[in-house]
Image (cartoon, rainbow, N blue to C red):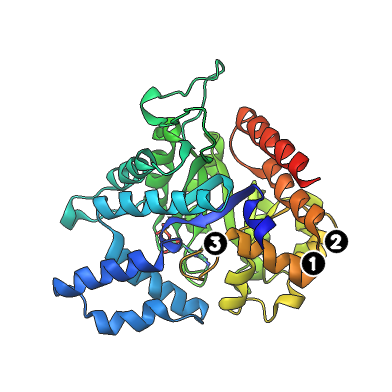
């Protein structure tokens, strides 16, 4: 476990509100309990429960959103989540979150995202790079890189953002999210994710917004096949997103399509087992994809909700599928090829891995 912890890693599928520390969630719940907004004893066991069905996970997200959806808290959790990933040597994090509107507290999707960016600015335990760079190597927006480069061996993390469309949303709401993503490109927003309860919503509702996003040059990743839905899975694969998440309920035809299109898969082992979308770890499709050298990346999904870390996901893969140090290192390194950030960031990350490889020998 120690070497997996110290190895550089790339996280490409992490939902902000799913990655909150238990201690923070409990603190926020206690606070709202004291204010009489919720009954703490009613929610404590919901938060601390370990085994949840997919359905229960989405009920938990509704509760988490009650606890976290104000600007100050969004800023706080963003800072904490980034620092937690950096502390286990995640060197590049693509953090996704659903911009939320809450008129009662004056929150718009934009102000929600500004609170997220504020959280990135507030990161202090590590150096952070979260702004895209010009061709001259300088950040597009000087104000937003608090890279405290002081020559010491402080950890450094690159963070980029994806905006999620929740499957409960309308076409108009999805379009609003895409437009916001376009406006916030200088703040490190690279693309769009489609997520949310997979039994809710229709692909045709989101397609216009996703097509617009693609036309405008945003990159796209889709939660695909989290429940059995042959028609939707096929439509999603035909859309040719840059990546897909999960891919649990694929049948032969869909595997063929995925493999011939070489779309990288974001694999979330613990999440799939906890939510029972895969019956047991030994039959997880990771094994087949890995053996066939299909592009894949290990991810946490919701490190808070599923009590995991990226190092634990690597450990789980290594111990279940019998992979050694070199194979795991190689797996982590190949993920650099699937990031949405530009070639400059890719080169930096390759340099980090090359340096780490020397220590590995
Ligand atoms: C689908 C998921 C998910 O966006 O509020 N989310 N969507 N499948 C999953 N697998 C278990 N895990 C998380 O983070 C929480 C939101 O991310 C999506 C859901 O829409 C959830 O409400 P944000 O930061």
The numbered mark at residue 287 is 1
Q: Which residue is more in the foreground, 47 or 24?
A: 24
Label 2 vs 3, first from the N-terminus: 2
Calculate the distance from the C-alpha at mark 2 to the C-alpha at mark 3: 23 Å
The reply, left or right, for residue 132 in relation to residue 34 is right
**Which residue was labeled with disc 3?**
301
Is residue 266 among what the camera can see? no
Residue located at (72% from left, 50% from top) = 263
Residue 287: image location, x then y, percent: 79, 67
> How many numbered discs?
3
Quadrant position of the C terminus in the picture: top right
Residue 341: image location, x then y, percent: 58, 36
Residue 264: image location, x then y, percent: 70, 51
Quadrant of the rendered image containing residue 325: bottom right
The numbered mark at residue 163 is none
Quadrant position of the N terminus in the picture: bottom right
Residue located at (59% from left, 59% from top) = 310
Residue located at (78% from left, 63% from top) = 255
Calculate the distance from the C-alpha at mark 3 to the C-alpha at mark 1: 19 Å
């Amino acid at each position: 476990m120690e070497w997996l912890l110290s190895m550089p890693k790339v996280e490409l599928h992490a939902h902000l509100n799913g990655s909150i520390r238990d201690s923070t969630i409990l603190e926020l719940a206690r606070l709202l309990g004291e204010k009489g907004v919720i009954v703490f004893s009613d929610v404590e066991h919901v938060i601390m429960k370990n085994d949840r069905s997919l359905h229960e996970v989405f009920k938990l997200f509704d509760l988490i959103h009650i606890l976290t959806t104000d600007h100050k808290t969004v800023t706080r959790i963003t800072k904490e989540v980034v620092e937690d990933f950096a502390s286990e040597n995640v060197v590049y994090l693509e953090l996704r979150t659903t911009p939320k509107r809450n008129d009662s507290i004056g929150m718009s999707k934009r102000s929600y995202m500004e609170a997220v960016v504020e959280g990135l600015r507030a990161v202090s335990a590590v150096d952070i790079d979260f702004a895209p760079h010009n061709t001259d190597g300088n950040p597009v927006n000087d104000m937003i890189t608090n890279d405290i480069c002081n020559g010491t061996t402080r950890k450094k993390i690159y963070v980029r953002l994806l905006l999620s469309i929740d499957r409960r949303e309308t076409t108009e709401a999805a379009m609003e999210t895409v437009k916001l993503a376009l406006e916030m490109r200088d703040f490190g927003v690279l693309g769009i994710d489609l997520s949310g309860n997979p039994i809710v919503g229709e692909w045709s509702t989101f397609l216009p917004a996703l097509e617009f996003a693609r036309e405008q040059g945003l990159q796209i990743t889709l939660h695909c096949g989290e429940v059995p839905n042959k028609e939707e899975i096929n439509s999603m694969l035909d859309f040719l997103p840059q990546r897909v998440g999960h891919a649990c309920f694929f049948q032969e035809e869909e595997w063929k399509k995925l493999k011939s299109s070489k779309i990288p898969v974001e694999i979330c082992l613990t999440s799939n087992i906890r939510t029972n979308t895969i019956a047991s770890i030994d039959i997880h499709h990771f094994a087949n994809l890995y053996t066939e050298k299909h592009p894949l990346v290990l991810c946490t999904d919701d490190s808070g909700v599923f009590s995991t870390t990226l190092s634990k996901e690597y450990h789980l893969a290594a111990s279940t599928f019998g992979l050694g140090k070199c194979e795991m290192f190689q797996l982590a390194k190949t993920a650099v090829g699937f990031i949405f950030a530009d070639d400059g960031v890719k080169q930096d990350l390759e340099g980090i891995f090359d340096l780490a490889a020397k220590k590995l020998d």
